[in-house]
Amino acid sequence: MKVTITVKEVNPDFDRELADNEFDGKESEENILYTWEDEFDIHGDVKDFKIRNNVTYELQTADGEEEATYEIEGMMVLDILLANGATTTCAFSRSIVKDTKKVITKKEDIHFFVFLKGGKQIVSPVTGIYINQKDWPKELPLPPEEDITSDEEE
């Protein structure tokens, strides 16, 4: 089976009433529903797809020879087991997840959507990991600014 994951940040300023009254419920150029979107496929033949909620995620880092592991609590973790025995993991701070949706196609492929709350600072050190900046380990430096998304005014 194939797995596609789509992550969308919901625009906190989206005006549902305006969309319903003026645009048949759809977003418009001045009233967008999502501020950004990431989409990626899990490469390989997927054998199993599991969702674990409110678990501790172990963020592993490496700086040259030095490796470290940081525990982040309150995470939603996707465990995707491949036919070759490898596991791909995606993780999201529960505090930024607004909703999820799992669609299974006729071919048994999975398209998993994660809708993130807008107005939060989100750290994404690598594809598939989305951590609320408030949950980021204090002893770990933040990644470069381009890996932190926010639509908040500072």
Image (cartoon, rainbow, N blue to C red):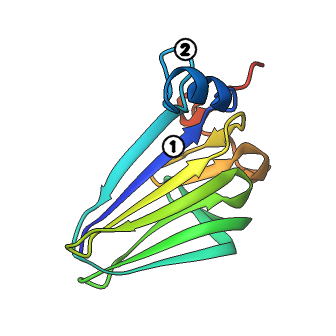
Q: Nearer the viewer, mark 1 or mark 2?
A: 2
- SS at circle 2: loop
Residue 72 appears in the picture as rendered: no
Give the residue drawn at x 42%, y 51%. 6
Q: Residues within 10 Å of mark 2 (few under 14, many from 20)?
A: few
Q: Is residue 46 left or right of residue 35?
A: left
Residue 28 appears in the picture as rendered: yes
Image coordinates for residue 79, horizontal then vertical, percent: 47, 75
Give the residue at mark 1: 8
Q: 152 or 133: which is nearer to us?
A: 152
Q: Residues within 10 Å of mark 1 (few under 14, many from 20)?
A: many
Amino acid beneath label 1: Lys
Which residue is most to the top?
30
Give the residue drawn at x 24%, y 83%. 83
Q: Quadrant of the N terminus?
A: bottom left
Image coordinates for residue 55, horizontal then vertical, percent: 69, 75
Give the residue at mark 2: 30
Q: 27 or 104: which is nearer to us?
A: 27
Q: Is residue 149 left or right of residue 88?
A: right
Residue 30 position (above or below residue 79): above
Q: Is residue 107 left or right of residue 96?
A: left
Residue 137 position (above or below residue 73): above
Q: Quadrant of the C terminus?
A: top right
Image coordinates for residue 37, horizontal then vertical, percent: 45, 38
Give the residue drawn at x 62%, y 43%. 123
Q: Earlier in the sequence, mark 1 or mark 2?
A: 1
Q: 23 or 86: which is nearer to us?
A: 23
Residue 130 position (above or below residue 105): above
Q: What label sits on residue 137 in the rendered view?
A: none
- SS at circle 1: strand
Amino acid beneath label 2: Glu
